Image (tube, rainbow, N blue to C red):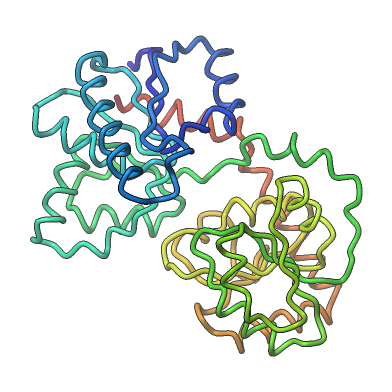
Amino acid sequence: MYSKRIFLVNAYSSFRHYNEYLYDKLSSEGFEIKKTLYVNPDFFSNGGKCSKIRHWFLEIKNVIYLMLHAHRHDIILCWDSHGEARILGLVFFLFAKNLKVISYNCSMDPRKWKKGTLKWRLNRQAFKNIIGTVSSEPQRQAYIDTFDLPEWHFHVLQDSLKDHPERLKSIVDNSDHGYIFSGGGAGRDWNTLIETARLLPQYIFKVATNAANAAMLKNAPKNVEVYCYRYHEFNQLAANATLCFIPLLGSWQGGVTVINDVAYLGKLTVTTDFLGICGYYTNGNDIVVVNQGDAKQAAEKIDYLMQHPNERKALAARAQERVQDFRFENFWEKMKKEIFTML
């Protein structure tokens, strides 16, 4: 049986600010949060030599702290920090420390590690001390097949809506303004978006992203409008869209937070194929999936959906129904019953 002592690990010091709902849930259920550990103070998170030195100093400090203070059955929860989980898992293995790390949202594609190589061997040893979650059964099977580990090491647990329903309540206008929305930053395929927009000059594309990604859209055609967003502005742009388009670069995972948000708002998403999406939605039922990098196919699907509002709205309605399954309460109960009990 797991203890009620919990250590939270995340990449950034702003973790609590953006995840206060998690702390509230832990407190309400009697968990004792021993410490929140991070490796990237936000002030130093923009790269450079100082940032890397500070990162590894904190990484080593966190490992030593957990080696000294964590006990068997304590919960060490790496929240969206797969890299930190693998470092901890490897250190615990090397020092024969009887501790298990929970890696929520294993975001690295294991298929890139060739069996027998040094990286594969190190990661395999790390995962012997890790209980990981992924978004879909194909992702889970990829980890099992890659590392030849027992199935109990990996569990399907989709990302939750977190506190997004509360934040989205501030949106008062959910009307359709006739444009296509794209947003976010990590792993976005901006080249495919640009080419898709060129093929669809009759539609306006409104893109909400950060300044670094906005610079990558400087050669976009005139029907692409770029906004450097704040959270509320981002959601309002999504709420007034007719359709959402999220093209991605990787084949593993990405864009799920935005896809879930727009589904909650009653909007349909067109996205590119990645291994995790089937854990959330079904192509042709509550989402539309196109091949990666295929701007022509994306343009054809988007144009069709824009021209057929009844079909688009039916798909969006099913997405809005499906996203209710990802409420934080459902996520948390599954985390406790299936993951914590493995410690």
Q: Quadrant of residue 271?
A: bottom right
Q: Nearer the viewer, residue 53 or 178?
A: 53
Q: Quadrant of residue 316?
A: bottom right
Residue drawn 9% across the image and 33% down it: 94
In this rendering, is residue 332 above or below 30? below
Task: Give percent across and percent down for residue 149.
Answer: 19, 47
Q: Nearer the viewer, residue 270 or 281?
A: 270
Q: Nearer the viewer, residue 133 or 95?
A: 95
In this rendering, is residue 272 above or below 58? below
Figure quadrant of the N terminus? top left
Q: Quadrant of residue 84?
A: top left
In this rendering, is residue 257 above or below 240? above
Task: Say left or right for 230 vs 13.
Answer: right
Residue drawn 89% across the image and 63% down it: 176
Task: Give percent across and percent down for residue 275.
Answer: 44, 63
Task: Give percent across and percent down for residue 25.
Answer: 58, 20
Residue drawn 62% across the image and 74% down it: 217
Q: Nearer the viewer, residue 73 or 338?
A: 73
Task: Say left or right for 19 vs 170.
Answer: left
Count of marks overlaid on the render = 0
Task: Say left or right for 241 vs 282.
Answer: right
Figure quadrant of the C terminus? top left
Task: Give percent across and percent down for residue 148.
Answer: 17, 52
